[in-house]
Amino acid sequence: MPESSDTSFQSLLHEIRVIPPSPEFAGQAHVRTAEDYDALYQRSLEDPEEFWAAAANELHWFAPWQNVLEWKEPIAKWFVGGQMNLSYNCLDLQVERGRGAKTAILWEGEPGEVRRISFEELLQQVQRCANALRSLGVRKGDCVAIYMGMVPELAVTLLACARIGSVHSVIFGGFAANALVDRINDAKAVAVVTQDSAWRRGNQVPLKGTVDEALTKCPSVRRCLVLRRTGAEVTMTPGRDMWWHDEMARAGAVCPAEPLDSEHPLYILYTSGTTGKPKGIVHTTGGYAVHTYLTSKLVFDLKEEDIYWCTADIGWVTGHSYVVYGILQNGVTTLMYEGAPNFPEQDRFWKIIDDHRVTVFYTAPTAIRAFIKWGDEFPKRHKLDSLRLLGSVGEPINPQTWMWYAEVIGKNRCPIVDTWWQTETGGIMITTLPGAIPAKPGSAGKPFFGIVPDVVTPGGQPVPEGNGGLLIIRKPWPGMARTIFNDPERYQRQYWSQISGAYCTGDGARRDPEGYLWLMGRVDDVINVSGHRLGTMEVESALVSHAKVAEAAVVGRPDPLRGAGGSGCETLVAHDAPAPDLKDELRAWVTAQIGALARPDDLRFAESLPKTRSGKIMRRLLRELAETGEVKGDTTTLEDLGAIAALRQADE
Ligand code: WTA
């Protein structure tokens, strides 16, 4: 990836296929033609407030808003003065609309059990859980940290927090104790909800054990609620730890949804940035509800009878917006699967699709590439004839992967919606709206209604058509992040300072003559490994916290399977050669500090890192080395050319 200081960059992708939706699909879609899309998009730009208000009116409000938008860059307020509750919209409203007996969550555990939880039952569980949280001392505005696997109780906990106006912070179950400590302490969480352990590929991941380790360093946490999932033995600390089943049994059955100000915080979700410290992205209630509701409805073309499955973990934003909130607000059945795609065999996903007659399937390119590698025989064991729409998110889906997905999974019958968005955007921003927009494999498509993307130079100038540049968003949208928790200054600097009047996404893109956007990856020091965002600085600071590491630089390296995999380069202070097992020691160290998802694939050692004369590590050279195995670029500002030679040698 080029440095962000480059004025323009060329895209190497020249994909020209255009694949229109079938007439059958288009004929039944919410938006049916390109003309309808164009007209509605135009209308949404002419009067965005009217457009979003119409969507908001499909939801339930305790009190109406006075203004749709108050915008004073970078602070947005949507549906100002309005009062609503997202849990009410996901549950009570659905029951009122006659969906009480309909399955809200269709869950399959990794060992194979199936649970169907109706909207009515979900509402009951959420009310009890909300009361249980209250009895543990959780109040409106308090942060609750959640560290669980993909079990229905995770969704119950989210909705219970939303019901009483406490703020959830879900921490992905793959994170290690230290990462948990940072996130819990930053948000000053008062309680943690977890489970004994989680199933993963037939093994148990001891979540409660990790929480115990973390909580020795988290003074704000008073209570820990523990779900019994696998039956693994855990240590319960008296006075602090409570069993989920005890508290649920004790809790009152009725807990009306609290009317909340539209701008009341809904959740914090930590994501990687360009410094070592993860950012607590804050989303609020009303605007986020409307954005996730409408994008779910139109992008996934949701209909009453759909069985919708998004494979993302709720530890990531995709799970928040498109496993739980957006889908339940539409009254549609959302499928949750607990385990790994290759357990007990590599056809588990396809079996689930057939068993439950899944109609809409939303996954990530990294998963699709794994399926391709495992072989067509696995999907071919199953019919997959219930599917009608496929989706992709998390990173660019390259044309070959797109074609495989369309042919082998979609049987050339299902449109594919590529969806570009971020933790910060809250919901989908760019997509190939199915039924209306022909897909160009490899392109994320066109802006969603009300969204105004642009591609500019780092100085903010328009780039010539077809050239690459920075992807920015010019107008506020309802699901946008409101701030970085406890650090509004960083929010302004990170997203709103580079290009005047616009949100800077950190991604590179180009726009083709038909207005399709082609994403080109990150332009900052964030890498995308298996669809998960990792700040290179995060991994670097974990590495340098090890006693034997003085300096470290981490750059992305293309990996055909996992996206840009991390490749670390360390320098030791001591001049003697690194011990043979140091590589493994450091990989284990990073796993312990952050989690296995951040473990560098490869480590190289050298006496020093290539630096500019001003002492800045030359990431561009390291990146080139990681990508191509050699350095051809400009080395004139390099302080010590020997460092590059040593790194190259270390690799041989
Ligand atoms: C990348 C995930 C190309 C992008 C929802 C973005 C994509 C980052 C796509 C956000 C896509 C996500 N095509 N790139 N369809 N979707 N990305 O915050 O670099 O985990 O900035 O949100 O993933 O990752 P995050």
Image (cartoon, rainbow, N blue to C red):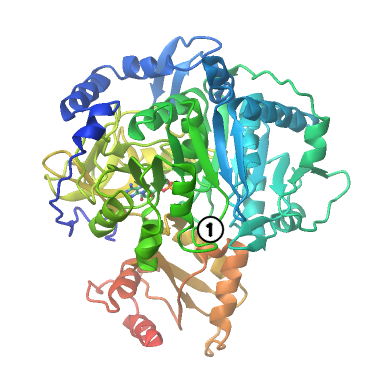
Residue 420 in the image: state x and y as whole percent: 33, 43
Give the x, y percent position of residue 137.
Answer: 78, 32
User: Quick check: 524 left or right of 468?
Assistant: right
- Is residue 153 shown left or right of residue 241? left
Q: Is residue 411 above or below residue 646?
A: above
Percent position of residue 549, x then y: 55, 75
| Position in image of residue 620 (x %, y %) | 31, 67
Q: Is residue 563 visible in this depiction of the protein?
A: no
Q: Residue at x 47, y 36 (%)?
A: 321
Q: Name above or below for residue 6 compared with residue 500.
A: below
Image height of 394 relative to 561, above or below:
above
Residue type at the position of mark 1: Ala
Front in this rendered view, residue 80 or 290: 290
The quadrant the N terminus occupies is bottom left
User: Taking 170 as reference, is 463 left or right?
Assistant: left
Residue at figure coordinates x 43%, y 53% from the top left: 350
